[in-house]
Image (tube, rainbow, N blue to C red):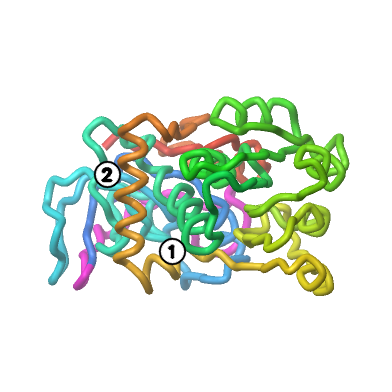
Amino acid sequence: MRALLCEHHGPPEELHFADVPVPEPKAGEVRFRVKAASVNFPDALMIQNLYQRQPPLPFIPGSEAAGIIDALGEGVSGLRIGDRIATIPFEGAFAEFAIAPAFRTAVIPEGMGFDVAAGFTMVYATALHGLRQRGRLQPGETLLVLGAAGGVGLAAVEVGKRMGAHVIAAASTEEKLALARAHGADETVNYAQDDLKQAVKALTGERGVDVIFDPVGGALAEPAFRTMGWDGRYLVVGFAAGTIPAIPLNLPLVKTAAIIGVTWGVHSRVEPDIHAENMAQLYRWYEEGGLRPEVSKRFSFEESREAIRWMMDRKVQGKIVIELAS
């Protein structure tokens, strides 16, 4: 099969295509013909040796995909050869065939295209797990989403609305904020132009927000935390800004607020039944029209390196996907 190969760590331009053996599924795994793969921030980190979970060299990047199952490993139940699925292999998706764990593989709704399915699981499952299990978001509460036009940020805007929250979307351009409003945000803040703390305080009548969903980190973290109201929950989702912030610990003390980590990958492995329930809920919301995944750009398989560069240059709104002709 043809695959995009990382033989040494570096920029995406140094990846190359190669013919490699088709992988065989082990116990608890499925093999699928890849129809589409999404590009995620961890993909860009892995090829540079900057991610916390690093595969040995050489490896095939690509953490999320959709396709058709063509082989099952021993002990797999609930899935069949020929099923249209979405899954998270965490590596190996930028290839004609890939292997994924069965517990992170789900049959997609009949009307969902492979391009949409390829970018659905990671962002929406992270958003729902973060807001439901970790953030305990309740109807009527106020949710602040940073990086609200990115893949997981936009998913959090939509999921937050479905859970009954009042959603404030924060992003760096008016174009991005317009996208967040189109996906349900009640109010917006341009943190490239306005003081984030003062703007959010004004929008909440000085009461502050109940939950903050932060996939950005960096310099935004502390001013965002200072918008927190009583018993607030600050969800640490990622560090797209490139730096890990240091929040003074007197802030959660005086605000009686919690800093909570959101690691969906570990959750899906440790609590697969809850993950399955979350995915079933997300697919129901999708079929009802309550979730509208944003695929802003599509690349061919031959353009895989350009797609990763697009992610690294932070040009992505919603999701970008690589489509295979197979």
The magenta stretch is 2-28
Q: Amino acid at mark 1?
A: Phe
Residue wearing tag 2: 67
Q: Quadrant of residue 98?
A: bottom left
Does any portion of residue 294 appear in the rendered image?
yes
Secondary structure of the residue carrying tag 2 is: strand
Which residue appears at 36% of the width and 45% of the height?
Answer: 282
Q: Is residue 266 above or below residue 312?
A: below
* Residue 26 located within the stretch drawn in magenta: yes
- State the CA–CA distance, disc 2 to disc 1: 20 Å
Camera-side residue of 115 and 108: 108
Residue 153: x percent and y percent? 59, 44
Q: Quadrant of residue 200?
A: top right
Camera-side residue of 30 and 308: 30
Residue 217: x percent and y percent? 72, 57
The disc label shown at residue 59, or none: 1
